Amino acid sequence: MKSKNSLSGSIAKSRLSNIFEPLKHPLQAIVVGILLGGVIIAFSGFNPFEAIIGMFKGGFGSAYYLTTTLTRSVPIIFAGLAGALAWGSGYSSLGAAGQMVLGAFTSAVVAVICPGPPAFVVAMSLISGAIVGVLYSLISAYVSERFKLDLLIITLMMNYVADYIASYFTTYVVKDPLGLDSSAIQTQKLTDNILPKMFEGYSLHWGFVISVICVLFVLFIMKRTSFGYKAKMGGLNSNFANYGGVNSTKMMYYVLMLSGALAGLGGACEVLGTRYRYVDSMITSPGYAWTGIIASLMSSNHPVGILVSSIFLAGITTGGSTIERSMGVPSEVTTIIQGIITLLITARFAVKWYKKKSATGKEGV
């Protein structure tokens, strides 16, 4: 009986360790990032304790601030999921930013020109944003495979192309002719064809629920299906995958298409839920895609971790804006904190890679 209890106790302890072990390093990075951020605040002439407490209160301290944070987290969650699917499967893609831009632009145009009741138009706009994300990701996948070019470089450069495409069409083809500010590069404002708010008087919209559903979907795909296993196998070792009967080229296309769909959907949710039109640089200026990458790194590409990390990162951004207004603390402090967290997490991966490489080199000798 005693041995049974001790066995069950050790199993429970092992399970808890499996849950909390991946969180250890990100939490350490967050603590160090906040402490160093506090040092910078102190050198700027402000009380660091008041500023940091104010930052968290401004991100999570009331229903208004919390819903604002959750709203801000939506595009970050989608970008993080898109990155996690690609990077978690071994494909180095940085294309989420461009796919989000085109998804946002397309959904705004479809919401203006598509006839029908609001629910139908919103559904078509969301689907069109996802489809454009898929199509744009296919271009990067094809160029990389056809010409044997580095996928990371291709997807990075395609982000700029997407931004220029959206900017051109917004400026010369679908610019709002009735806008109060004729110099603003934006599409016509939506009135009825939008994602409804979840609570009256707050900014949180149903795009957040869609993002949570996508988190569960990606979790299921990556952890519970043969597709997730094959995708990881194809990305990490294409020769081994091909030998095992998995077409690594096809898997790359499938993974990047799914990643593109999530990114495009994220852009569409931002337009239909928050901005109600496409505004030039509305995706690239806030850096949603890059913040999504930070969230993905913090969570080691785990979908649920991305949800939590995205809300945290959105919270310190919202809180940073709050303490800038109330205390005069520069909002750039939150960017510095994010940068420190990213640096510490990536440094950990670099150390692991170096140790692995050194061990492989010793074995070869």
Image (cartoon, grey):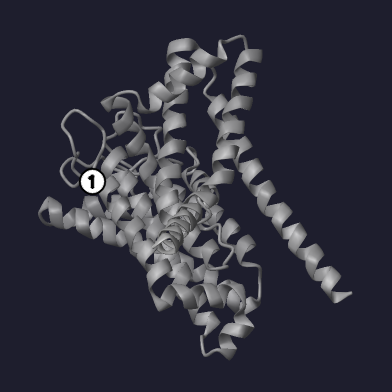
Which residue is most to the front? 1
Question: With 187 as the anchor, is 259 left or right in this view?
Answer: right
Residue at image position (55%, 59%) is 158
State the image quarter where residue 99 is shown.
Answer: bottom left
**Camera-side residue of 278 and 37:** 37
Visible residue check, residue 344: yes
Which residue is most to the left? 117
**Camera-side residue of 67 and 167:** 67
Q: How many marks?
A: 1
**Camera-side residue of 206 and 267:** 206
Question: With 111 as the anchor, is 75 left or right in this view?
Answer: right
Residue at image position (64%, 61%) is 153
- Residue 343 at x, y percent in the picture: 65, 42
Visible residue check, residue 162: no
- Which element carries disc 1, helix, strand or loop? loop
**Location of the C terminus (image quadrant):** bottom right
Residue at image position (42%, 20%) is 322
**Camera-side residue of 27 and 287:** 27
Question: With 220 as the anchor, is 168 left or right in this view?
Answer: right
Residue 251 higher or lower than 51, as above or below: below
Q: Amino acid at mark 1?
A: Trp
Residue 52 higher or lower than 186, as above or below: above
**Location of the N terminus (image quadrant):** bottom left
Residue at image position (50%, 69%) is 139
Residue 342 higher or lower than 97, as above or below: above
- Residue 63 at x, y percent in the picture: 26, 27
Q: Which residue is mark 1?
A: 206
- Residue 271 at x, y percent in the picture: 31, 45
Question: Is disc 1 surrounded by few (<14), some (14 to 19) or many (20+) residues within 10 Å?
Answer: some
- Residue 154 at x, y percent in the picture: 60, 63
